[in-house]
Image (cartoon, rainbow, N blue to C red):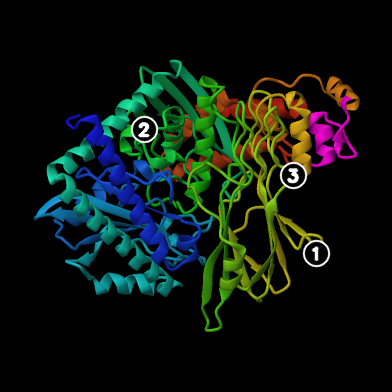
Amino acid sequence: MKLDPVTLAILGNKLAAVSEEMCLTLQRTGRTLYVKETADFACALAGLDGRFFAYPRSIGVSGFVGLECAPSIAAVGPLEPGDVILTNDPYRSEGLATHLPDLHMIEPYFHEGRKVAYGWCFVHCSDVGGRVPSSISPVNTEIFQEGLRIPPVKLMKKGEMNPDVALFLNANSRTPDANMGDIRAMLAALAAGRRRLEQTIGQHGVETVATAAVDLVAYSAEKARSVLKRVPSGTYSFSDYLDDDAATRLPVRIALSATFEDGEVHLDFTGTDPQVATAMNIPSRGRPHAWLTLRVLALVNTLDPTTPLNVGMLAPVKITAPEGSLVNPQEPAAVGVRHAAAIRVNDVLNGAFGKALPDVMPAASSGTVIPVVMAEPDGRGGRRVQVIEPMIGGTGARKGRDGIDGRDSGISNLANNPVETVEAELGIEISTYALRPDSGGAGQWRGGCGMELTFRVLTDDSNVLGRGLERLLFRPWGSNGGKPGMPGQLILNRGKAGERHLGKIDVLTVNAGDTVTFLTPGAGGWGDPASRDPQAVLRDVINGFVTVEAAESDYGVAIIGGAVDAAATEALRKAMGESTSGVAQGAERERWDEAFPASVMDRLNRGLVALPGAVRQRRRREIFDTVLKELPDGFPRIAASEAAVNAARQKLEAAAGSF
């Protein structure tokens, strides 16, 4: 590093502040709820290598630090002042965009004719065409169904908007005015970054600022290596599942071996399922992509909060993501619901790191983010499309701390939409938006509660979309003796005639008077529930996080007349016995693992991923159809006999041995 520590610290704070001011500009001038309220956007400053050296800490999507602009910049050729690149194509941008509704912009910043940096921003826009309103459907089978693909192109040329690009954008969206409003807000954010960077150069000089961009990345890399050196050397393996691929009842496996050595970590996803024929694939392009590395950022920032937030934090990270797998799909795989798989990747990283650092890492978070979308008739033959709420659950408990209720520290740092604003924008009436009692996993430290959203529809022929519904089957796991969280549910007309419990949905058609209820999962607990302070259980009951009945059954705490009955509590806890000390994944996952052991699944998936793309999915379905014939319908919610499990496992082992 060339700059002295004081100058570097000053410029680090100033440049991070530039990125935050860009975000504030974008939020204040944005058109849609998803920008103004939810904050599904981000801004950053990138160096001449296209990687981010300044990133906001307190606003916007927190996990995109590792995205790379260089392929998109190279794709458009020479750039001049006033040019702005636009793209949303995950494949042509080489993973900068990760699904089509995310519009990314890049502007070169010049000083006295010399290019000194790039400004970057993205927003999740309302609709880019495709098969369904809001463009995202879990059952799309290829990216062509997901909307307008925009390769890296110049939206702005020398400060003027390219009318042909704008025409394509408007012609391929159900919400062209809303989209253009957010696009202009993005341009305003980039302009704010340009002005503030020029101001910083005026104060410190162009060479000093350019040097700071390089030194900040090197400094973060150095601090990240120092943190990772504190992790005990070794290889730690963990696997977890998506409930299914939204088209079949087959769970989707994500496997990881994390090897820590001398300040570096190698994340090997070998053993992960092949890419699916639906929209849950993560287009990482086999790189240390943001969706595959977020937990590394969290670990480094937890153990050393002074580390500057930039791409240098990922310098010690190596990735193996087999091509053709869920975490590195081949074009034209659909990717619209990639966040569902990315959240499970986060859980897998959390589980593997937890084996190395059991007193640092938490239990599983709720494991789901559900952008609940309403598309209602606009009276002119079209539809208004808005996100009602990005539904989440809670955070996992960790040693010494309960999980956070109704807040997920997972992948995106999204905010909730105020009820009043939603009801002003859409024809719905929200009757319940609250925490979900008893949903957090029991433990010495309790997992965070999930949430309930119930709304009444006011307009006939409306559509509800809930992409990313997960943890309906496999529960968020508890750690070090803690219990798993409660699974999620989706209910139509709860408590009324015709009540229906639904699974994953694509487009749910509803009419005036219908009610829709989303119940999100709770997070995992940490430690033996019988060791929890009875007074903490009482406080949870008073605050509505735990019911009196669950206090008794889950924690062995008797609450009578609003107080803890010490004698009854002692008797209950003696009867409970000791909790196991490992990971508690719930009966459904335990049953599944009996029939589908991790070691066999690793071998099977290595063989499947190596097959040609056209063969992969067909062969996987054939194998699972053969194995599942030995098991009862409803497995693993329903237990199977020992003989059935043994027969299924033998067929799985035979299939794995055929490669």
Please state which amino acid type lies under the numbered disc 1: Gly
Identity of the amino acid at label 3? Asn
Q: CA distance from mark 3 to mark 2?
A: 36 Å
1 vs 2, front mark: 2
Asked if the stretch drawn in magenta spans residue 565, the answer is: yes
Which residue is denoted by mark 2 in the rendering?
A: 307
Q: Label 1: how many residues lie within 10 Å, few (<14), some (14-19) or many (20+)?
A: few
Mark 1 or mark 2, which has the lower sequence index? 2
Mark 3, Cα crowd under 10 Å, few <14 / some 14-19 / many 20+, is few
Query: Does the magenta run of residues contain 337?
Result: no
- Which residue carries the number 3 mark? 543
User: Crowding at label 2, few (<14), some or many (≥20) Cα neighbours within 10 Å?
Assistant: many
Which mark's residue is nearer the viewer, 3 or 1?
Answer: 3
What residue is shown with label 1? 498
In terms of secondary structure, where does tag 3 sit?
helix
Boundaries of the magenta span: 545-566
